[in-house]
Image (spheres, rainbow, N blue to C red):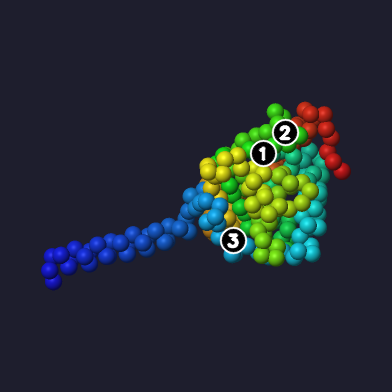
């Protein structure tokens, strides 16, 4: 065996080893680490919801008062958009499952974002990421996010257009429903931290109530 041939075999072995490690590491990548450009999103694994029922289910979960805060029954705090999207998306997904529907996945977008609204102090906020439930309806990716569109679900592209400030400075990922934060594993993240979810739910319900008081509004029935 010549020295040059030995070098070739060694190089092939090292390349194979690195490729194997890389493939294994993919399962440990976070929602942020796997994020890529919009056109590279893989939409093939999204659960399918019925075209006949998805709007009705969207409104039902949006309006349902199943959370508790300070002795009150409250909806998911859609009106506090400054933070807490990961918590809101998680509650929406879990309620959909409780109602017997296929479990949505979770779409994340990172980068140059801006969310506007009449009930947002100073008119807008610029979070560094946003997350929401996502399904497919008749083969089209639909995002279920009342904090962005209170009246109806939006196509993935329309949803992105509403919150992206600079299209050249954003990346996306679609992860398992249990993926809670950008730092959580995108695939098979493990059991959800229920203590953290409950603590953050209480915190953002409080923030929403304070914001509504600040601008002189009461909760919608």
Q: In the rendered structure, find residue 215 and report the number of the disc placed on it.
A: none
Q: Quadrant of the C terminus?
A: top right
Q: On the picture, is 24 further left or further right than 174? A: left
User: Label 2 belongs to which residue?
Assistant: 120
Helix, strand or loop for disc 2:
loop
Foreground pick, 68 / 217: 217
Q: Position of residue 109 (x, y in %)?
A: 58, 47
Q: Residue furthest right?
A: 221
Near mark 1 (Cα within 10 A), the count class, few <14, some 14-19 or many ≥20, is: some
| Image marks 3 and 2: residues in contact by CB distance under 8 Å | no
For the point 53% across and 42% down, the residue is 169
Q: Position of residue 127 (x, y in %)?
A: 61, 38
Helix, strand or loop for disc 1:
strand
* Image mark count: 3
For the point 64% across and 52% down, the residue is 157
Helix, strand or loop for disc 3:
loop
Q: CA distance from mark 3 to mark 2?
A: 32 Å
Q: Earlier in the sequence, mark 3 or mark 2?
A: 3
Q: CA distance from mark 2 to mark 1?
A: 9 Å
Foreground mark, 3 or 2? 3
User: Label 3 belongs to which residue?
Assistant: 43
User: Label 1 belongs to which residue?
Assistant: 115
């Amino acid at each position: 065996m010549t020295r040059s041939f030995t070098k070739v075999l060694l190089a092939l072995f090292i390349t194979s080893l690195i490729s194997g490690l890389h493939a294994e590491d993919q399962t440990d990548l976070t929602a942020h680490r796997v994020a890529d450009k919009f056109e590279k999103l893989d939409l093939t694994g999204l659960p399918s919801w019925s075209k006949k029922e998805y709007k009705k289910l969207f409104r039902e979960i949006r309006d349902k008062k199943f959370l508790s805060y300070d002795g009150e029954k409250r909806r998911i705090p859609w009106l506090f958009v400054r933070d807490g999207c990961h918590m809101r998306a998680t509650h929406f997904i879990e309620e959909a499952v409780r109602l017997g529907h296929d479990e949505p996945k979770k779409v994340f977008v990172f980068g140059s974002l801006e969310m506007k609204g009449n009930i947002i102090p100073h008119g807008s906020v610029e979070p560094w990421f946003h997350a929401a439930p996502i399904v497919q309806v008749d083969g089209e990716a639909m995002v279920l996010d009342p904090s962005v569109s209170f009246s109806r679900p939006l196509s993935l592209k329309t949803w992105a257009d509403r919150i992206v400030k600079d299209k050249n400075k954003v990346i996306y990922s679609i992860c398992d429903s249990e993926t809670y934060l950008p730092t959580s594993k995108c695939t098979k993240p493990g059991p959800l931290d229920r203590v953290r979810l409950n603590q953050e739910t209480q915190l953002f319900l409080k923030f929403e109530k304070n914001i509504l008081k600040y601008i002189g509004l009461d909760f919608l029935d």
